[in-house]
Image (cartoon, rainbow, N blue to C red):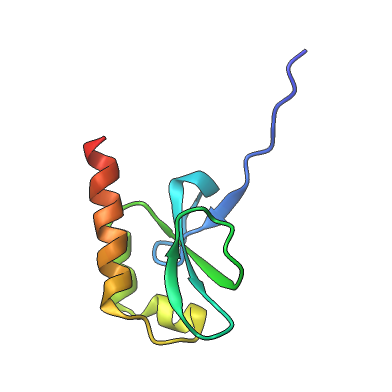
Amino acid sequence: MSINKKIPLRKCVATGEMYPKKEMFRVVRSKEGEVSVDVTGKKSGRGAYVSKSEQAVEIARKKNILERQLEAKIPDEVYEELLTLIRRESIL
């Protein structure tokens, strides 16, 4: 008998689609108000998930979706880091 393990799903803030947690990036706002990309998915703080596509990151940037979700100003470095992580994974 095989036991099916439950796969945690998360909703992309940009596209509104549900994806497995491992197929998404988490952006976190810490208690101090610092915003960063959480590659491990275990940092403490308020998190928002973005799917691993350049279109989703651009939608989130244009519509300021992450700023609204995390209630903090998102520096451009966060978006650039997301894009470089997506491009790096597409090469591998």
Q: Which quarter of the rendered picture does the N terminus lie within?
A: top right
Q: Residue furthest top?
A: 1
Q: Position of residue 51 (x, y in %)?
A: 40, 55
Q: Residue furthest front?
A: 32
Of the pair 43 and 71, the residue shown nearer to us? 43
Of the pair 55 and 48, the residue shown nearer to us? 48
Give the vertical position of 90 relative to 46 (above or below): above
At horizontal 36% and vertical 81% (from top left) the residue drawn is 74
Name the side, left or right, on which 18 lies relative to 66: right
At horizontal 44% and vertical 77% (from top left) the residue drawn is 35
Name the side, left or right, on which 27 lies relative to 90: right
Q: Position of residue 87 (x, y in %)?
A: 23, 49
Whether residue 58 appears in this view of the structure is no
Whether residue 83 appears in this view of the structure is yes
Give the vertical position of 18 relative to 78 (above or below): above
Name the side, left or right, on which 27 lies relative to 52: right
Indicate the quadrant where residue 47 lies. bottom right
Q: Which quarter of the rendered picture does the C terminus lie within?
A: top left
Figure disc tally:
0
Q: Position of residue 89 (x, y in %)?
A: 29, 43
Name the side, left or right, on which 31 lies relative to 61: right
